[in-house]
Amino acid sequence: MIAVAQRFARLAPALVLVALLSAEGCSSSQVACPCGTGGYASVTVPAAENTPIAAVSTDPPCTAMDGGGGTIVVVRGSVGTCQVRVRLASDDTYVFSVQFRASGAGCCPDLVTAVDASVPTLVDAGTAG
């Protein structure tokens, strides 16, 4: 019993240090938080399921890309709204928007999440096809 108490007494300072470091967690400038770099949304343009996408555009700080199968992936690293324009091979042009809001807290206060997306709307019926 005395040997156990002596062993614990030798380990106690190390255990206290581990507990303090663990409690400090992400509040320490020495700890790297596993935060993502931004929010994203996948929006399907129904007409693009049968007609290839020719171009996708948006303005910084947003990024939009063809995700395949008529889906557009929109990414943003800050709060705000992305306006996306999709031109199909038929020259039909669709637009939609995606809204991003703050969702972070604690260790990752700057995280954003896509919270709403409008329905893609045909704004220009192309002349091709």
Image (cartoon, rainbow, N blue to C red):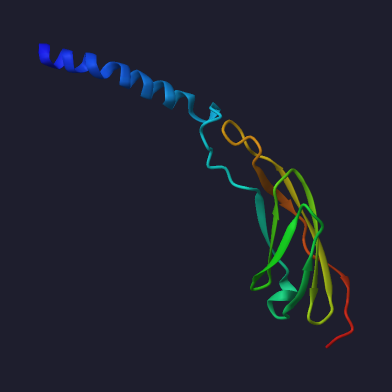
Frontmost residue, 83 versus 60? 60
Quarter occupied by residue 8:
top left
Q: Is residue 6 above or below residue 88?
A: above
- Left or right? Give the position of 47 relative to 18: right
Give the percent coordinates (x, y) of residue 60.
79, 54
Q: x, y percentage for residue 71?
A: 67, 68
The answer to whether residue 69 is left or right of residue 11 is right
Determine whether 30 is above or below 45 in the image.
Answer: above
* Residue 13 position (above or below residue 91): above
**From what the image shows, is residue 96 above or below residue 7?**
below
Q: Residue at x 59, y 36 (%)?
A: 108
Question: Residue placed at 17% from the left, 13% from the top?
Answer: 6
Q: Point out the image quarter for the N terminus.
A: top left
In percent of the image, x 64 and y 72: which residue is there?
68
Residue 124, picture quadrant? bottom right
| Total marks in image | 0
Image quarter (top left, top right, bottom left or bottom right) of the C terminus? bottom right
**Front one among 77 and 120:** 77
Q: Position of residue 56 (x, y in %)?
A: 77, 68
Q: Residue furthest top?
A: 2
Give the image quarter of residue 45. Answer: bottom right
